Each structure stands twice: as C-alpha cells, then as structure tokens.
Image: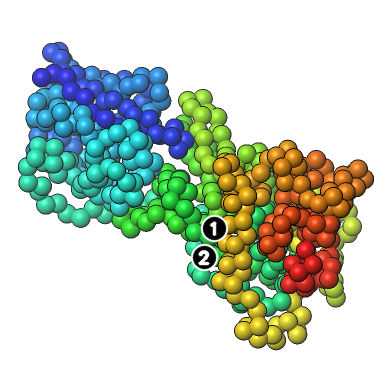
Amino acid sequence: MSLARTWAIALVGLEGHLVEVEADIASGLPKTTLIGLPDAALTEARDRVRAAVVNSGEEFPFRKLTIGLSPATLPKAGSHYDLAIACALLGAVGVLPADRLYRTALIGELGLDGRVREIRGTLAMTLAAAGAGFEAIIVPELNANEAKLVPDITVFGVRSLRQVLALLRGEEIPDEEPPRAEPRLTSDSLTRRVPDLDLADVAGQKDGRLALEVAAAGGHHLFLHGPPGAGKTMLAERLPGLLPDLDTSDALEVSAVHSLAGLMSGGEAQLVTRPPFIAPHHTASLVSLVGGGSGMPRPGAISCAHRGVLFLDEAAEMHPLTLDTLRQPLESGMIEIHRAVAVGKFPARFLLVLAANPCACGMAGVPGGLCSCSQHTIRRYGERISGPIRDRIDIVRAVMPSTRVELADSKEDRESTATVAARVAEARNRQRHRFKGHDWRLNSEVPGPVLRRDHPPDQAGLEELEEKYAAGKLSARGFDRALRLAWTLADLTSAPRPTKETVATALQLRTGAPLIPPGNHRDIRRSA
C-alpha cells in the first residue's frame, strides 16, 4: 500500500474545518514534499515527524514522499498536524489499519523523541470533530480533560507516538513517562482570578451598588469615575459574583475561546461555568485587546471576556485608538479579524466596565480635594474616552470616598452578593420569558426597532424620552439604550412595564446625574 489517509482539524478563528491528510509513497530519490498551504511551523513537521518515527522504533520510508493537506485552498497553521501526518505515512507503509485511521481524528505536536506535546485549541477542534460525526479523537494527554468536555465522542489521551500506534493496532498500550506541561507563550495574566468576593464588604457606595445590580440584571455597560482609592476597582471585581452561571452552550463556547487563547491548563481543564473576568492592563496593545497577530488570527481580551466582564481600569490612560476599537464589538457582540490568509470570527458579547479618574491628578470634583489641574487639562483628560464610546455606555456613576459614618456601618447591615444575585436572577428570568422564541435574552441585546414597537413604556414614559430626544439630549442610540435601561429597572421591581418614574431614573443612571433621592437605591427601586 503506497497511499493512506488520516484526518486532522484546522481552526479559522473559532470555527473548525476538517483537513484530510494524504500520504503517498513513490519510487525516486528520498524527498518529502508538503503541499496544501502550510505555514512555517507546519512545514517543519517534515523533520519532526521523521525523527519521531525513527525514535519510536518504526522504519521511516526514505523514498519520495508527498503529503497533501486538503482542502488545498484552506490555509493551515500550527504544529498540531504532526500526529496525523506521522500516522498517514505509517499507514502508507502498511503498518497501520486504514479503516481505523479513517474513522479517527488525530491532533497533536510531536517531539523529536516521539512524545506528543500539548497544543492549543483542543476543545474547539474536538467540537468540530464531534460535529462531523467522528467516533473518536486522539489528543495529547495534557489536553484530554479539555477534549472530554465535548459529549458524544470518545477521547483518547496519549503520551507518545508509540502509544498511538499501539492504540490503532489494537495492541497493549506501552507505559510512558508522564508528560510535562510546556511553558505557554500566552500567559494567563490576561485574566484576573477573582475569588468569591462579597458585596457586603463594600462600605457605603449605595449608588455604585445600584449601578452594579442594574448592569448585571440587564447586561448594561458601566462607567465608574472618581478619585483614586474611592472603590471603583472594588466594585468592579464584585460584578461577576452577581451574574448567574453559564448555560451549557455558553460554557462550551467560552471554554473553546479560552482553550484557543492558551488560558486553559490542559492537565486540569474544566468547563468554564462562571462568567469570566478579564482585566488587561491599561498599556495593553490593540492586538492584545481585540485579537489578531500575524498569520491565523488569535482571540484577544474582548473574546476571552465573552459572556463575562471586561474591566478596563485607568481607561483614560489607554491609547484612544485602542479604546475606540471596542465600538463595533459593543454593538454586534462579535469581532471579525481580517488577515491576508483568512478572516477569523470570534464571539465578543461582554459586559464592559470602565474605570477612570476625573483628571490627571485624580482630585477634580472631590469634596475637600485639592486639584492641581487646569480646566483645559481636565477637559482634555476626559476627552481621551471618546464620545462614541461614551454613547455606548448605559450607566455612568461617580464613585466618591465613603464617609466616616459609612465606614463605621456594620457589615451585617449591607446586602450580600447572594442577596443581590437572587434579584438579578429573577430579573433575568423575566427577560428570558418576555423574549422567548427570539435570539436575544437580555434587555441590552434587543434591537431598538423591536424594543420601540413591541415593548414601549407607558405613555408618560414615552413622552419623557421623546422630549429628551427632541431637545438633543439623547441620540437615537441613546434613546434605545435608555429604554432598555428602564426595562431592566422595571424587571428588578417586577413592574409590568416602565413608567415615567422608571424612565427618569434610567436617564439619571445614563447621564450620571445625581439620583433622587440621592444614594438611596432601595427607595429608587420602590418608586420605579
């Protein structure tokens, strides 16, 4: 037999494509040719596979070898094709059964000694293999737990090429040394590992607590501004605790993104069931935020925050162009990264939280504070967060230092995360029931025309919005966002629809105006 076929998986963005790996052995001078648009890492597979086969005790066919990757027009990138190439070559020699090869997907990088090394994107590849109807998939042992998150497919975790060959031949699996996790090129420092933080630990900040509750209930973006040390980061870190667990489909999607980004530990991989909290540094580059890179696009921070929270601290210190790249993902919930070789599509439906100081010194507008900045400097500092980004933010709140009386309050008198999370879950259930049968699930996701036509407020509330729009105080986008915010306030109070009072509160939250009565969020919910 001089021709054999195996299957591997190519990833373009988060979408998996089947790749048929064909190996042909012909007479002629020894030469290995790899065709099918391989990148540099894949081209080097010729040498890795040769050394791995020889060092695994098998005879390498030193003849004219042609390895084809189909479809030939699909760009191939990465080293995870090594295992499929090696098995195709050995199948062409006749030492592996052709029927078993053709029913099993193979992914994994080979070391020169035959070890099967850990790779990225295993979860997304396994999802693609299961969707294509494969019975089994062979993956590196360090990625096995990750692949086993996918139902309806048998996963074999292997340590070496020798184990793969024994498995395919139906022989006893030889024992090998346990694999060692490789250093990752992408650090998980992109993610802030937030433990279970309790909202009851936050003294005062009643306006900020209400803003968190409304943002969590309706998926509304939030902007917190105030002096250093007032509690902006403390509030933002407690927002994920108010969000409900991810359902199965969302958990698989989020886990697949994290796998491709290199944020999952293969040996201890678990399904991501809690909304992620991603907090990149304010010096983060544009590519690290939205994704990209040379060759095949990779997910960035906004995709890693999918179905969770993206927290940008010191937002005014970020490069304005980097911050403005969030405009399109904030509207569409996804990001398309166009490169010469391919277009990568990644989900990016996140809850954005911005935090910033009011000026360079941080003391502008602080009662009793001494600001050393001129009015021109303060204005220029605020303009670093552009108008189009501000217009996409639903809730704006000033976070001022807590008073001595608030700091002295007993923790038992403050609402805990569990208490607020229960109200958030109830409000989300109301939204899920109202939008049953549609693609959207939260108030923040409903298209404006549908919201105005099918879910208007009462007549007094509608007149309040139309008056602000006619006066130029609301853009068309702002009109819809204020109405979405009013619906979330209504859901938190179990009201059948937004009223004039609810709309007024929504406008105050959106514009950053002082709440009436100021600082008393329980009275606000009751009046709404």
| Residue with the most extreme top position | 28
Place residue 524 in its image quadrant.
bottom right
**Relative horizontal placement of residue 367, taking residue 54 as reference (left or right):** right
**Relative horizontal placement of residue 152, taking residue 455 as reference (left or right):** left
Place residue 403 in its image quadrant.
bottom right
Does residue 451 appear in this view? yes
Instruction: Tell me which colouring the rendered structure shows.
Output: rainbow
Q: Which residue is mark 2?
A: 194
Residue at 70% in and 86% down: 408
Q: Amino acid at mark 2?
A: Val
Pick the residue in front: 488 or 374: 488
| Residue with the most extreme right position | 471
Residue at 88% in and 48% down: 463
Element under disc 2: loop
Labels 2 and 1 touching (C-beta < 8 A): yes
Q: Is residue 218 above or below residue 389?
A: below
Label 2 to label 1: alpha-carbon separation: 7 Å
Q: Earlier in the sequence, mark 2 or mark 1?
A: 2
Percent across and percent down for residue 192 are 52, 60
Residue at 91% in and 43% down: 470
Percent across and percent down for residue 261 are 45, 46
Percent across and percent down for residue 322 are 65, 44
Q: Total label count?
A: 2
Q: Which numbered disc covers residue 277?
A: 1
Label 1: few (<14), some (14–19) or many (≥20) C-alpha neighbours in 10 Å = many
Q: Is residue 303 above or below residue 524?
A: above
Q: Amino acid at mark 1?
A: Phe
Q: Quadrant of the N terminus?
A: top left
Percent across and percent down for residue 462 are 84, 48
Q: Quadrant of the C terminus?
A: bottom right
| Residue with the most extreme left position | 171
